Each structure stands twice: as structure tokens, then as C-alpha cells.
Amino acid sequence: MSRLVLLLCVATGLASCERFPHFTPGDTPGSLTPTDSSSVPTYDFEIVNAYPHDANAFTQGLVYRDGVLYEGTGLNGRSSLRKVSLETGSVLQSIDIDGQFFGEGIALFGNEVVQLTWLTNIGFVYDLESFEQKRTFSYPTEGWGITTDGHRYIMSDGTSTLYFRDLQTLDELGRIEVRGEDGPISRLNELEYINGEVYANVWLTDRIARIEPVTGRVLGWIDLTGLLSAQDRTGTEDALNGIAYDTDNDRLFVTGKLWPKLFEIRLTP
């Protein structure tokens, strides 16, 4: 979801927002932070490393594998799939998406990359090495985030629902509703599967939900308020979005749309 959408809705009034059911006029980043009970832990963070990130990349999906990042970017006419150097932020390989599509989340499985699109109900499957498009697939909802637990894909559509999809056909296998102690948690966006949990950016907040994927219960929250410092901001940055995990070295990476930096962080109570 885009800051441009927010501006459009504000400029044209409530009626124009009917197409964007997850936006309420007057909302600003951070104002939709879900309430949570004291029995659900909230984690702070320490910055371990900060790396350059392309400030023109509207980050929608992020995955780490074999020493590099794979990144899906959004906005019509600017959407792409990229292979990116972690240390320098430079783009090592990329493919642009046709301008009619607004790129969204990505996931890697085997030698393939899956990429969603926002409103067009079409996803793409690419060869991991060449980025050649192998096939497409369809889904009836919006496309926001996607990850895999190695047995199935897990997909979000901006609501409180997570969808499970077959690794080969991408047909839906089932779904769950994500709930905190005060009810459903909507605006689930970019996803990453980490040690048996689904980490989900909650759009328009600086929080990541840690979700139990069998029941949909929120196990905890990660509060990333202040991650991008005032000194690093130019005023063009959009929402926090982008979670990647280095399984071999237990490293957690996060960034945001149009952010100039990508961070390796360590969670603290």
C-alpha cells in the first residue's frame, strides 16, 4: 500500500477510498498501532549494522539467501524484482514489471521466485538464476505479502487473514484469521517465516506482529519506532516494510519503502 494512495484519498474525499478498504481518512503512520495486553510481550531492538538501501526502491518484499538480498518493489511503472548486495545496496540483477502492475511481496522456494501484484489478481513465478518469467497464477484477493515455511506459501491481502497456498500450483490450501487479545489484526503486509513464526509488518505502523501460523494467535510485537533516525530522513520515506532473515547466521534485517538504509537488528525485551 502506498503513501500515494493516502494522498489520493485525502484529496478526493471518503468516496474515493472505497477502493481502498484498509484506509480511514485521517490515519497517519503509527496511528493504527494495535492495542495489546501486558501478557503479550513487546520487543525493542538494537541496531547491529546499518547498510545502504536504494532510496528509490518502494520495498514490498524482501528475502535473504546465500549472501544477497532479493527485493520486490512497487508502484506502477516502477515495480521490479531485484538481486541486491547486502553490504553496498547496489543492484546486481533486476527485471522491470510491466507498468500496469503494482509489484508486491516476494518469496523464494527452490529455484523459483514468486511475486505478487496489488490489485490485478495476478502473480508471477520467475527462475531464480535468470529472472526469466516461467508462469503466472491468479488469486481473488489483493496481493500484499508472501513467504514460505518450506511446505506451503503463506500470503497476506491487507486484511487480518493469512492464506496458505500450494508450493507448485499456488492454489489455496486453507486460511486463518490473525487475532490479538483485543480482536483481529488487519493490514497485515510483508511477511517472513522465522523459526516457526510468521513475522508480519502491520501497514501504517512501526510494528511487526509475531504470529503462530497454526492458530493465528499473535505471540508478540516488535516495536521499531525510531529505527530510521531523524538524521537519516529526507521526508520522502514511506512506511516500514521489508523483513528478511539469515537462517544460517541468525540475522534479522528490516527496512522500509523509499528508506536510504537497511538495518540488521537484534531483538531485546
Image (cartoon, rainbow, N blue to C red):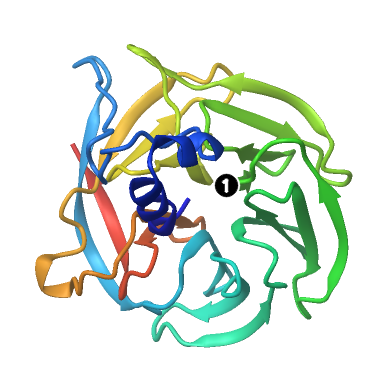
Q: Residue at x 51, y 55 (%)?
A: 247
Q: Name the residue under label 1.
A: 145
Give the crowd class for mark 1: few <14, some 14-19, many >=20 residues within 10 Å: many
Q: Nearer the viewer, residue 253 or 26?
A: 26
Label 1 residue SS:
loop
Left or right, residue 186 beside residue 31: right
The vertical placement of 58 against 12, above or below, is below
Where residue 210 sits: x, y (%)? Answer: 41, 33
Judging depth in this view, the residue of 1 and 244 nearest the camera is: 1
Residue for point 30% across, 73% down: 261
Q: What residue type is labelled 1?
A: Gly
Q: Can residue 188 be seen in this view?
A: no
> Residue 121, percent across and down?
74, 46
Number of marks drawn? 1
The answer to whether residue 138 is above or below residue 62 is: above
Q: Can residue 245 be seen in this view?
A: yes
Q: In this view, does 269 lie to the left or right of 17?
A: left
Query: Is 161 on the left or on the right of 137, as rendered?
Result: left
Where residue 249 appears, as percent x and y from the top left, is 44, 61
| Residue 34 position within the rendered picture, expressed as x and y whole percent measured from the top left | 29, 26
Q: In which quarter of the image is the C terminus?
A: top left
